[in-house]
Each structure stands twice: as C-alpha cells, then as structure tokens.
C-alpha cells in the first residue's frame, strides 16, 4: 500500500472507532439529555486542545460470545488536553458502548492515563458513565477496578483528582470517584449507587426508583458523596473550570496567583452583616464575600451539612480555603456530617498548599442521642486531627460564639493556628451564659427567694466575665482583638508573612486519623 492508501486506511479505521456504540445508541443517549463521551471532553477542555490516545484498543473478553463483538475504544476515551490553560489528563466512559462497562482493556486505558497524570504531575479528570464491572469479563473486570482504586489512592494528595458522574454509575464506577477529591453531578442525569434498585428489590424486597436511591440531589444533600450540583452538563463543566483555577496542578506547587482585587461592593461591608442581637442568625457566606477578592467564593458541598460552609476564594490574589460555621443552620454546630465535611476539605487544602481561613461562630458540638450513637466522638475527632496535622498557614477569626469543644476544634491556637483574631463580639467560654449559670450557681438559684431574678443576675454576671474575647486575650490564646472592618487587612498581612512557613512533623510512617 502507498502512503496515501495507508493514510486512507487509517482514516477509515478511525472513522469506525469514532462511531462509538452506533447511531441508535447515540440517539438513546441524546434522548436522556446526555452528551456523548467525546462531546463531553471536547466541550469541557480548551478548544482544539484534546489529544486522544488508545483509540484502537480492543476488548479482551472471550466468554458469552464477546469474542464476536466489536466495542469501539472498549467503551472509554482517554487523552490529554488543557483546561483554562492548565494541562490535564482525562478519560470519559462511553455509555453507548456496552453501557460504559469496565472490562480488562477498558481499565488498562484508564490506568494508563492515570499513570501519565502521575508522571506528568497534572490533574486527572474522570467522566464516569458506566454500569460498573463488565459482567461478561468476570474477575478481569474486578482486577481492573482494583488497579484503578490503587492508583486513585497513590495519587491522593499528589495530583488533584476530579470525578464527574454523568450517567447511571453502579458498583466500581462509584468507588473510584469516592476515592477522588471532588465529585460533580448533574440533576436527573447522574445516579450513584453500589447496588441498583433491581438488586435491592431482589435482596430486600424494597422498591425504590434510581433517582430516589442515588440521584444527584440525594448524593449532594443526604449522603454527601458528591460535592458540586449542576442543572446541566454545560453548567457542570463551567463549575469544573472555576474549581481548577483555585487549585494547583500538583502538591509541589501553589495555585496560580491572580491579580489582586478588592471585594466587589460596598453592601458587602463586614460590619453590616452580623446582627446586634447575639442570638440572631446571619449568613456567614456574606462575611466571606465581604473579605475576599472580587467577592468570589466557590462553595464546596453547598447542599450537604449546611451548618458548616467550606470553599475556595482568593485574598490578595492568593487562593485560600475557607471553613466557616453557618449560624443560619443549627446555629453552626459541629455534628457528624459537618465534621466529616470540614475535615476532608482541610486535608485537601493542606495537601495542595492552600492556606486555611477559619471563621468561628458556634455553640459547640451538637448534643443528642442520635449524634452520640452515630459516632459524633470519632467524627468530631476528624476535625481536631485534620487541623492539628495541617501545616499550611492557618488563620482563624472568632466572629462570635466559640464555646467548649467548638472553640478548640475550629482551629484554635492550641491546634497550631498561626494567627487567631477575634472580633469584639467574640464570646470565648466553656459554654453559653444560660447553661453555665444554671450549673455553677445551681445552689444559689435554688436557695433564693426569687430564683428567676437570681438566675438572671447570675447570667448577667457570667456574661460580663466570660462573654467577650478579653479573657482569652489576657492568656495570649488569641493574637489580636480587631475591628471587623480590619479583618481583610489582617488576613492579607498574615498570608504575606506566612509565605515561608515550614513545619517539621515527628518522624512516622503515617498517623492513624479517626477515619
Ligand atoms: C456488561 C452492561 C453492564 C455491565 C450495563 N450493561 N451494565 N454490560 N456489564 N455491568 C449493558 C447492558 O447490557 C446494555 O447492553 C447496555 O449496557 C445499556 O444498559 P441498559 O441496562 O439498557 O441501560 P439502562 O436502562 O440505562 O440501565 C443502566 C444500569 C443497568 C442501571 C447501569 O444497566 C444496570 O443495572 N447494570 C448493571 C449494574 C451493575 O450491577 N453492575 C455491576 C456492579 S459490580 P445492550 O447490548 O443491551 O445495549 C461492580 C464490582 C466492582 O462494579 C465493585 C468494586 C468495589
């Protein structure tokens, strides 16, 4: 064959492979509002940046007549490209080919691109749309998943790993995402479960729809498996593009700095946000926006455990991670879910050199039988562990209440915050005035002629003594009591002078966090 003929032959082969599961399967995919796998990659990445590899890989299945079947690209597309100028490795499972199920060669393509990502030290993006382990390939499919999980774990904390769920994902197709840093889902399109409704019906006799079992909303609001919720695939891709700007390519780098910008609008003045009644709630996100460049805040897990707010922003051009109690929800308490949410985020920021800013306003850990039985002790301990272990610059601002375990857990100086600032509204004590007065003055209140008057008097006394930042300041537990309007200024300075921070940890293989 001449070069021209060989080139024609290549084009024909490519054309065949690029068909995916064929027009009928593609039509079915489109009817459910989904893009095809290749469309997804091209839409997400920078124009013309995608370079595909392993297009001609073929499946290795032999049983159940699989040897007679042609599965283009073995149901997964892999390659490299750029996203907002950042280099990335990417794969997208093609549901039109055998339901995106994972056979031996399918897994090999994924593990190869994962190895590339690790070698090149660039983020990995996985678009998952798969029925899980390819049943016909038996243990080889399971082996494939095992190889992926192992690599997810090795890559954890070295390169950012982003998972996008864009279809019904079952079994192994959800465990790999669970090992990655951020999971994106789209309403009505994404489904995540270990065992689907059919299996549940067979084993337990319970009937439930796919959406109720593992729809996008369920995974964002209830299980907390997913971190970002979008209405459409396009919106989901915009969220990924935004996230990538806040994080570095790998753990040797810092996120790219941006031009410094002031917060956006005067209405975001920090002083105007907190109500004068210390019991009134407010939205802590307004305070975050008042403090950060352009008032831009990318909230992570917005729908889950809303009593804590986590997310990325920039201060003076530098990417920072915020962890803030949300007084609007359950008074901002720490509980099982909010502890998990915060601890994981703290560890991500620490692994990827993103300084942490903690805003404190909470009455403590949530009391109750449910919480105790759900393990609030070991879940709550995750926050203590994550903050204590984090060595990135840590800045804490106590806005209002910092009671009991909550005071310690929310990055106090005792867990090695580098700077702790307190607003004059801060109340740092073992517990709130009402509870405290009832306990320590119980006998006096009981013996009084008018117990209610005495109770009120004692609460007043306690408030005067402890419901302020000055006792903690007198012991040096906080570094400065500051005017709210000065907060951004203090944070900018703290970040600036913490740039060279280095911490040596005791030699060990690794710690044992309260997983
Ligand atoms: C082989 C599969 C497949 C699988 C789907 N297909 N899942 N083929 N192995 N796991 C094929 C179907 O046979 C069908 O092929 C095509 O993909 C499209 O699937 P449909 O069922 O028509 O699509 P839909 O109605 O949208 O349902 C999607 C689905 C369902 C919910 C994912 O297919 C399903 O329940 N699949 C099985 C899920 C599962 O139990 N997977 C194993 C998990 S165990 P044709 O030729 O008809 O078009 C696992 C082990 C790892 O993953 C665990 C690690 C810890």
Image (cartoon, rainbow, N blue to C red):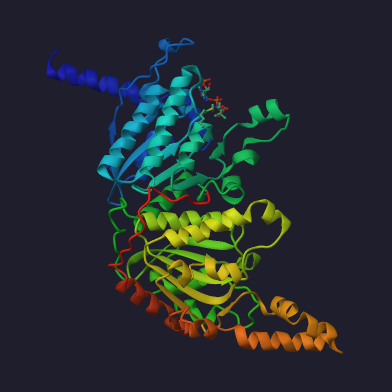
Query: Which residue is rendered at x = 73% and y = 77% of the image?
Result: 439
Q: How many marks?
A: 0
Residue name at image x 43 percent, y 52 percent:
239
Residue 304 appears in the figure: no
Judge whether residue 256 can be spotted in this image.
yes
Residue 336 sits above or below residue 162 on the image: below
Q: Position of residue 14 (x, y in %)?
A: 29, 24
- Side of 289 relative to 253 (left or right): right
Residue 125 in the image: state x and y as whole percent.
38, 42
Which residue is situated farthest in the right direction here? Answer: 449
Left or right for 502, reference 34: left
Q: Can you give x and y, in whole percent of width and height, for residue 161 in the image?
A: 39, 45
Q: Nearer the viewer, residue 500 or 173?
A: 500
The residue that appears at 46% across and 56% down in the rendered structure is: 345
Camera-nearest residue between 410 and 200: 410
Specify the quadrant that holds the N terminus.
top left
Q: Is residue 204 shown above or below 223?
A: above
Q: Position of residue 168 (x, y in %)?
A: 54, 34
Query: Is residue 201 depicted above or below 309 in this figure?
Result: above
Q: Nearer the viewer, residue 483 or 421?
A: 421
Residue drawn where x is 51% and y is 61% of the image: 384
């Amino acid at each position: 064959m001449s070069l021209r003929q060989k080139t024609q032959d290549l084009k024909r082969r490519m054309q065949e492979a690029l068909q995916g599961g064929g027009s009928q399967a593609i039509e079915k995919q489109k009817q459910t509002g989904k893009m095809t796998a290749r469309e997804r990659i091209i839409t997400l990445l920078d124009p013309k940046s995608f370079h595909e590899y392993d297009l001609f890989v073929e499946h290795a299945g032999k049983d159940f007549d699989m040897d007679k079947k042609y599965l283009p690209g073995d149901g997964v597309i892999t390659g490299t490209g750029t996203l907002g100028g950042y280099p990335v490795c990417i794969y997208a499972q093609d549901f039109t080919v055998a339901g995106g199920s994972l056979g031996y060669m399918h897994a090999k393509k994924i593990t190869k691109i994962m190895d590339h990502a690790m070698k090149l030290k660039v983020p990995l993006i996985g678009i998952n749309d798969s029925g899980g382990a390819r049943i016909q390939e038996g243990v080889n499919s399971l082996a494939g998943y095992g190889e992926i999980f192992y690599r997810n774990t090795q890559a954890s904390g070295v390169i950012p790993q982003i998972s996008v769920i864009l279809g019904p994902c079952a079994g192994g197709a959800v465990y790999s995402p669970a090992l990655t840093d951020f999971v994106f889902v789209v309403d009505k399109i994404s489904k995540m479960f270990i065992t689907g409704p059919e299996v549940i019906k067979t084993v337990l006799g319970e009937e439930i729809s796919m959406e109720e079992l593992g729809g996008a909303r369920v995974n964002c609001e209830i299980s907390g498996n997913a971190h970002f919720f979008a209405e459409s695939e396009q919106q989901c891709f915009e969220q990924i593009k935004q996230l990538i700007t806040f994080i570095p390519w790998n753990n040797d780098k810092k996120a790219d700095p941006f031009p410094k910008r002031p917060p956006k609008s005067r209405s975001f003045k920090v002083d105007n946000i907190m109500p004068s009644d210390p019991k009134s709630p407010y939205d802590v996100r307004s305070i975050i926006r008042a403090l950060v460049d352009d008032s831009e805040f990318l909230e992570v897990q917005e729908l889950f455990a809303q009593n804590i707010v986590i997310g990325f922003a920039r201060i003076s051009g530098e990417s920072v991670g915020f962890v803030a109690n949300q007084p609007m929800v359950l008074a901002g308490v720490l509980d099982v879910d909010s502890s998990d949410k915060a601890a994981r985020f703290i560890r991500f920021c620490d692994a990827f050199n993103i300084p942490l800013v903690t805003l404190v306003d909470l009455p403590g850990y949530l009391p109750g039988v449910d919480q105790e039985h759900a393990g609030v002790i070991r879940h709550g301990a995750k926050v203590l562990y994550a903050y204590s272990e984090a060595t990135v610059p840590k800045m804490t601002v106590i806005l209002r209440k910092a009671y009991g375990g909550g005071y310690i857990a929310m990055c106090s100086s005792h867990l090695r915050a580098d700077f702790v600032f307190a607003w004059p509204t801060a109340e740092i004590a073992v517990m709130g005035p009402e509870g405290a007065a009832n306990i320590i003055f119980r006998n006096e209140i009981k013996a009084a002629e008018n117990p209610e008057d005495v109770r009120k008097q004692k609460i007043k006394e306690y408030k005067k003594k402890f419901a302020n930042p000055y006792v903690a300041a007198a012991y040096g537990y906080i570094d400065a009591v500051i005017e709210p309007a000065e907060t951004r200024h203090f944070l900018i300075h703290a970040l600036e002078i913490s740039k060279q921070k280095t911490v040596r940890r005791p030699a060990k293989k690794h710690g044992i966090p309260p997983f």
